[in-house]
Image (cartoon, rainbow, N blue to C red):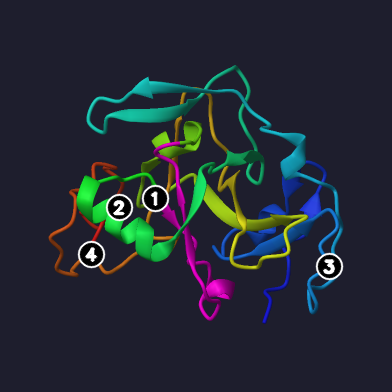
Amino acid sequence: MFDLPTIIVENKIDAEAIPPAFHTYYEGMMTCQGVPDVMMLEVVQLRRQCHIKIAKTCNKGWGVFLTGSETVARGTFIGLYAGQYIMKEEGIHHMASTGSSYLFDLDFYHLQDVNPSYMIDGERMGNFARYMNHSCEANCCVEACYIDEGNLAKPLVAIFANEDINPNEELTLSYFGGILPSANSPSTGVRCECKKPLCVGYIFP
């Protein structure tokens, strides 16, 4: 079963389609049976549509910030979460043994019934996206993207602006996948430092 794809407009995804958080879209020659035809404007292959820098934050270690003088519009492609595909079991073991926090779980809604399941490990080979910090009111979101990929379980993770973002503003993601737990939920997780009004107080349950 496939989600309906997010419609692509010029070099942005349709801003009205964000949120909800879980969309899937396809670029290039995707020939998986049952995948609906879509407009193939190769948004992700146009590369990043903004200038960024990696810099130290005051309380969250490294972070990713927008540079330049122009505001980035909601729906603009920011980049990919790059890394190595590994089996989920390997990723869980790696995280438990090393404390690695650069694992992206490919648990998109349309993959819940797909086996085997994968993670993207950005620790050993990755890009700027592994330094994007969590925010309970994130200004970026992720989308599953397929470019000439026949394995449904291995999407690219494309990052888009979830709102208009001003120069020098930090680029953030929701580590909860866009669905926040209750602020009253008990947790022994890592303390959240986003300082947003809707902050639930922690990052990992």
State if disc 3 and disc 4 touch (CB < 8 Å).
no
Residue 138 rendering spot, x and y as whole percentages: 43, 47
Q: Please name the residue that numbered disc 1 is placed on.
A: 103
Which quadrant is home to the C terminus? Answer: bottom left
- The three-letter code of the residue at mark 1 reads Leu
Q: Which sits in the foreground, 43 or 74? A: 43
CB contact under 8 Å: marks 3 and 2: no
Disc 4 designates what residue?
183
Mark with earlier residue (1, 2)? 2
- Give the residue at mark 2: 94
Q: Are marks 1 and 2 in contact (CB under 8 Å)?
A: yes
Q: Amino acid at mark 4?
A: Ala
* Amino acid type of the residue that numbered disc 3 sits on in the rendered structure: Thr
> 39 left or right of 124?
right
Instruction: Describe the element under mark 2 as helix, strand or loop.
Output: helix
Q: What is the count of numbered marks?
A: 4
- Residue lying farthest to the top in this orientation: 68
Q: CA distance from mark 4 to mark 1?
A: 24 Å
- Looking at the rendered image, the disc whose residue lies closer to the viewer, 4 or 2, is 2
Q: Position of residue 132 (x, y in %)?
A: 42, 38
Magenta stretch holds residue 83: no
Say what secondary structure mark 1 lies in.
strand
Q: Earlier in the sequence, mark 4 or mark 2?
A: 2
Q: Residue at x 40, y 34 (%)?
A: 131
* Among the two numbered marks 4 and 3 on one chain, the one whose residue lies closer to the N terminus: 3
